Amino acid sequence: VDNLIKNENVIVFTKSYCPHCKATKELLDSLNCQYKYIELDKIDNGKEIQDYLFEISNQKTVPNTFIKGQHIGGNDNIQAKHKNGELLPLIKD
């Protein structure tokens, strides 16, 4: 998990049925952003990963987004950053 957060430009930890996760992915798609996502409900150790994410980010919910190793937060956080014009500069190389 640490390597993914460190090495991926944008990584989103999600659950397949979560509407907030879908909204985050749709936003990133609309910005033509390359990102990786991991659906925690589709992998065997998803609960353990979510517990670890809480330890390092103090966030229990999904989506849990990291950009260039920096914790961004959930859907409300990423949508607010986009509205404020702060998201695009973060995701651009």
Image (tube, rainbow, N blue to C red):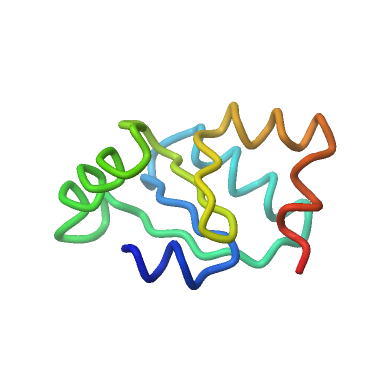
Q: State the residue in front, 67 or 15.
A: 67
Furthest-right residue in this view: 85
- Is 31 displayed left or right of 20 in the figure? right
Q: Is residue 6 above or below residue 52?
A: below
- Left or right relative to 8: residue 46: left
Task: Report which quarter residue 82 is drawn in.
Answer: top right
The residue shown at (69%, 45%) is 27
Front one among 21 and 81: 81
Q: Percent from the top left, x then y, of residue 14?
A: 41, 47
Q: Percent x, y for residue 10?
A: 57, 60
Which residue is rendered at x = 68% and y = 32% of the image? 79
| Residue 56 or residue 75, whichever sits in front | 56
User: Which residue is rendered at x = 78% and y = 40% of the image?
Assistant: 86
Q: How many marks?
A: 0
Q: Quadrant of the N terminus?
A: bottom left
> In this rendering, would 93 be left or right of 37?
right
Indicate the quadrant containing the C terminus: top left, top right, bottom left or bottom right.
bottom right
Residue 17, percent from left and from top? 38, 40
Horizontal and vertical percent position of residue 49: 23, 52
The image quarter containing residue 80 is top right
Seen at 51% across and 65% down, the residue is 36
